[in-house]
Image (cartoon, coloured by chain):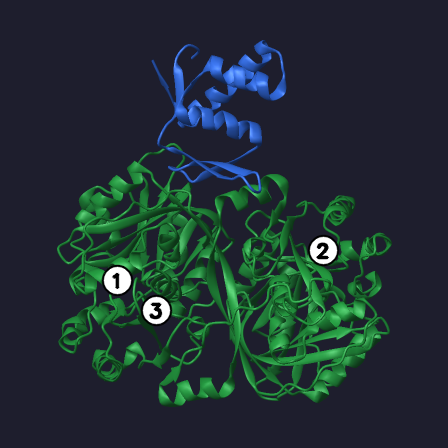
Chain colours: A blue, B green
Amino acid sequence: MSKGTYALNRRAALEGDADSGDYVLVDTHSATLCACNESAWRILRSLKKGATLADLTGLLVELYGIDREVAHRDALEFVTRLSAMGLVDEHG
Amino acid sequence: MSTDKLRVAVTGFDGLDVPHPGIAVARALREGWRGPIELHALGYDAFMTGAWMQGTAHELHVLPRLSSGEGAILERLVGLAGRLGLDVLVPTLDLEIPVMARIADRLAAVGVHTLLPSPEAIYAIGKLRLPKLCHDHGFPAPRTIHILDMGDLALHADQFGYPLFVKGVVAGAKRANDSAQACAAAAELNEKWGGGALLQQVIEGEEYNVAAVVGRDGSIRSMVSIRKVGVNSKGKGVVCTVVDDPDIARHAREILAALNWCGPLELEFVRPRGAKIPYLIEINCRFPSWILLSHWAGVNLPVLCVEEALGRRRARLPKAKPGTSIVRDVAETAIPVDRIEALARFGTVAGTAPAARRNRLAEPEGVRVAVSGVSTFDVVNAGLGVARALRGAPGIGRLYGLGYGNYDSGLYRPELFDTSFRLAATDRTDALLDRLREIHAGTPFDVIVPCLDGEVPRFIEIRAELAAMGVRTLLPSRTALDRRGKDRLFTDPAGLPIEGFAIPETVAARSEESVLRAAAKLGFPVVLKGAVSLAFPAASPAEARAAWAALREQGYGEALVQRFVDGERFALAAVCDSAHETLVATTIKKLRICDRGSTWSAIAVSEPALEAGFARFAKALRWTGPIEGEFIRAKVTDRFYLIEVNPRFTAWIAFTAQLGVNHPLAAVRCALGLPVEFAAPAEQLVFMRACEDAPLPTSAFAGIATKGVLRHA
């Protein structure tokens, strides 16, 4: 799990209200709601379009100004968790 | 869009805290029908509370009881059809669907369309036949047996193993952990529905329901699948979310294909963790009570049902939007007693007009009030009634709702609160104070009204700190609060003036043996009460044992065994000032009570002797703030017995505003040191409450869950 493009699948839906800053990831199979902060929301929106780990790492670096290695580890963990929930697929 | 007015009759507007589906079906039709529509509410007595809610029905009509036979039902419906020009009938109650199915052709002959299955198809899905149906088709289902002889129940339950569900043959289900609980549940359900009881294996897992409308040709017009996300202690789904799970949908289609069905229907499933295929628990031959969710999800199944009944079919139907959620809340209104009497006498009366849009913020510079206790999850909290009473009241400005759980329904009601906040779900008083300080710093408020029994002691403890923040309260002292507690009031009433009412003889018991001894001393029936909440009637030693076990299960180490008083239920709500004088008092006679003892319909009554006696009682307690006494007037002696004293507003308190004696307004004004004056109430009104589902926007839920705040205005 490192080189391909990751994308949220149809099971995942994103609901957000930009005015209040309240964002949710919905697992449409189980009705599980995951409330998201702004950063998680931006990563999920990237994943909606499809993103590589490098893309996500870059996004985290941009958002938090953190070390690239730490950002890579966090991005990998995020995608791994989404994958375990069955919400993200790897392509290519 | 059709310009001809469609006239639809719907049944099922009662049910109280377990609402009949007609309430949601009618609202779904009103909100989703594209064209003029006139809705007629049909019921079996004048107290179908859901039908009286504002804007629900054009007219209300009483039908003969089902026990009077289908001839009588048909005659009444044909009469109504002739007078009203009814186009469609949508029955929604389990027991009446077979009757309506049998007379459907004769209704069609007078122009009333229905979409109903054949009586044979209904018979095949009945609770008693469902195990065989599942076995024949290989559908996973819990092991179920039917017990006819209640004397054999304990034996079969022991062989079955615990826990198990005991179910009535028509409706109702209770979980039992031992034979005493199983026997008590079975006796209650058999008493209510007859026909014995069912014992069913408990399948642990997530609860999913599927509602569908099947066309006359057997094709599934549409389906909506939901998961019960929030299930209350009665096992009822009070928060439901639409799902799009292909395994559930596929299995539902397989089942529907085996049923030879036509019309609305609900499949109830439980899916064990990790399993793909869910267990089929029940099939209901009607819409579920959560069906309004289908409207908000974009596939209004009641509208589809009416279209199909009329032979109109849309070429394309959208899919239900997954993630759409509802939370169960309540609506309340007050109806002139003449109208209820007219419905009872003449069988028909005009419905209640839609509510006029009130100015949500009557006085922008008015008093800002924070109100807690805004949930309907298990019981209807009083904070909802307090908010209803204060909304738009003179001198009242912004209202803030304070909840403890993400599913507290009031948090999501913009018509009640300008902003909602979640408090920490902890018993720690310092955490409560810290959170209130945090809220107050960003959103200042002038008065706070705590409305839950359990939080009153903590608010008493932090009253000085709140005052230092400029927040006023109207609360009793800790001594007064403790003195009215059941454990002291009933076992040691000495020193309190008990005039105008009596206290039922009560014995405290700390073991099963002492419970039985106390019950023998008082004579059956008795009531076993917990010190804070819960009350279980017991008519025999076996029931007393089951009641004691139920109290123990809830963590009680002591039961107050009280003589059961048979009679009508009353409640007396009052507000006392800091000199312990009663500022306002209102007495009601309860007309509809749910299983939990909550009031769903009531009429205001004049009981000056009782009110004077209770005022002396409150003064002797040195009470300050809202207080409620609950009474039973003994059938034989007409004597009032005090059975409970609640240290807060009661959930029906919005009724006092409609009577012209707004108790929450009196409390707020008193807390601020302002005078309290009310004119005498003008007309005799009846309080009515019904369940009402509210949309639960996903992002609003996220706001409460993550930030603890939801701004409506």
- Location of mark 1 (residue): B1
- Location of mark 3 (residue): B194
Q: Secondary structure at mark 3?
A: loop
Amino acid marked by disc 3: Gly
Mark 1 vs 3: CB contact within 8 A: no
Mark 2 vs 1: CB contact within 8 A: no
| Res B455 label | 2
Q: Residues within 10 Å of mark 1 (few under 14, many from 20)?
A: few
Amino acid marked by disc 2: Glu
Residue occupying the point 45% across, 76% down: B353
Left/right placement of residue B88 relative to residue B364 reads: left
Viewer-nearest residue: B160 or B240: B240
Instruction: Locate the N terminus of chain B by quadrant.
Output: bottom left
Left/right placement of residue B515 relative to residue A81 reads: right
Q: Chain of mark 2?
A: B
* Distance in Å between CA atoms under marks 2 and 1: 53 Å
